[in-house]
């Protein structure tokens, strides 16, 4: 039986990938040690997700390993060897703010951990496509230099700009910009994944995601914008907006749509590819707009406050130009827009917290 290795398997994208490929008939081996709980506290633990995966998918095998442990990762890949058909690497430390607290931890997880996975794949399954969830934060705060126009509920790119119609392409430079330490560690991983494609000829793809979201997210204040916002809306927990008048814009892609993109890559892999991926013009919102939508879904006002201080390295406006991926994989398309995504998250949060 062909095996799919998924790191960060109890997280949002990892769990979506486990379910997707298990239903396609693969044996799925997940690597996850619930570091999200260490990063963001008990409320962000992915233990519930792991338990659900193990109940739902008999073909799923969970491995509680740390991707920083080179020997453990190499032994895992050696165990399955040539049976490994695909590697999906989603495990990461995902927060700007948290990275500054423990720079060594952030870099060792994001950069060194990625290197461990890459090298184990090169040694034991070099023909298996290698998919990496990078981030749009590799561009640092360069997007904030774009000519933005303030509208009533959002910032928007000047309509005369060549990127206004479709969003930000991969042509944007990642140099001479403030990344945050998190952005820097993800740059290191992103470039290394590309290099294993170019230097060793592996089939690698970096997905530089915008706001990855969905009902399976264990949202926390420092990471998981829409899921955490909806959690606050459902539970009445106070929510804080940081900077830019709450008009900062994110494009939002449902975890299913992203994993479906992985499926298309798996079927027709390429080498050393980089893709900006997100909801694009199809699915995006500002924080202010998201709050309004959450209030409409819950039927009551949110308890939220505003802090003028923006987060370091945060984007004022980000919409991904996804045309490069669509050009390479024309049969792929987005299936959810922002309203559909929020409705799913609301239903999940209402059910999850009703059971607690």
Image (cartoon, rainbow, N blue to C red):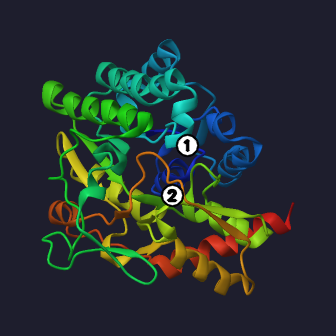
In the rendered image, which residue does mark 1 sit on?
Answer: 9
Q: Quadrant of the N terminus?
A: top left
Q: Quadrant of residue 238?
A: bottom right
Which residue is located at x 14 percent, y 78 percent?
160
Q: Residue at x 31, y 35 (%)?
A: 187
Q: Position of residue 144 (x, y in %)?
A: 31, 57
* Callout 2 secondary element: helix
**Crowdedness near tag 1: few (<14), some (14–19) or many (≥20) residues, C-alpha within 10 Å:** many
Spot occupied by residue 200 in the image (x, y as percentages of width and height) = 17, 25
Residue ranking furthest to the right = 356
Where does the image place residue 254, in percent across and percent down from the top left?
Answer: 47, 66
Q: Specify whether residue 125 is in view.
A: yes
In this view, the residue farthest toward the front is 308
Q: Nearer the viewer, residue 69 or 292?
A: 292
Mark drawn on residue 23: 2
N-term mark: 2 or 1: 1
């Amino acid at each position: 039986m062909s095996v799919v290795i998924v790191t960060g398997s109890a997280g949002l994208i990892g769990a979506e990938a486990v379910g997707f490929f298990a239903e396609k008939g693969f044996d799925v081996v997940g690597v996850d040690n619930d570091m999200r709980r260490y990063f963001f506290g008990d409320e962000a633990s992915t233990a519930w997700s792991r338990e659900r995966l193990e109940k739902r998918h008999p073909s799923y095998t969970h491995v509680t390993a740390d991707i920083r442990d080179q020997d453990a990762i190499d032994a895992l890949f050696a165990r399955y060897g040539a049976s490994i058909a695909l590697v999906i690497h989603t495990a990461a430390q995902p927060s700007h703010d948290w990275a500054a607290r423990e720079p060594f931890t952030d870099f060792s997880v994001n950069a060194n951990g990625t290197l461990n996975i890459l090298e184990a794949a090169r040694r034991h399954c070099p023909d298996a496509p290698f998919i990496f969830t990078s981030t749009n934060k590799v561009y640092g705060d360069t997007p904030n230099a774009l000519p933005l126009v303030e509208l009533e509920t959002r910032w928007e790119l000047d309509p005369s700009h060549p990127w206004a119609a479709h969003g930000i392409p991969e042509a944007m430079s990642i140099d001479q910009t403030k990344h945050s330490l998190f952005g820097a560690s993800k740059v290191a991983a992103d470039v290394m994944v590309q290099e294993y494609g170019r230097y060793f000829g592996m089939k690698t793809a970096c997905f530089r995601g915008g706001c990855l979201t969905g009902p399976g997210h264990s949202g926390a204040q420092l990471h998981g914008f829409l899921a955490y916002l909806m959690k606050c809306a459902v539970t009445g927990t106070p929510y804080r907006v940081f900077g830019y008048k709450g008009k900062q814009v994110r494009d939002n892609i449902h975890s299913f749509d992203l994993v479906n993109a992985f499926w298309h890559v798996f079927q027709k892999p390429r080498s050393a590819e980089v893709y900006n991926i997100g909801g694009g013009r199809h699915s995006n919102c500002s924080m202010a707009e998201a709050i309004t939508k959450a209030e409409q879904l819950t039927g009551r006002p949110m308890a939220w406050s505003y802090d003028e201080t923006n987060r370091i390295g945060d984007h004022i406006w980000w919409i991904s130009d996804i045309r490069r991926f669509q050009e390479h994989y024309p049969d792929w398309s987005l299936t959810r827009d922002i309203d559909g995504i929020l409705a799913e998250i609301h239903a999940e949060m209402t059910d999850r917290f009703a059971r607690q």
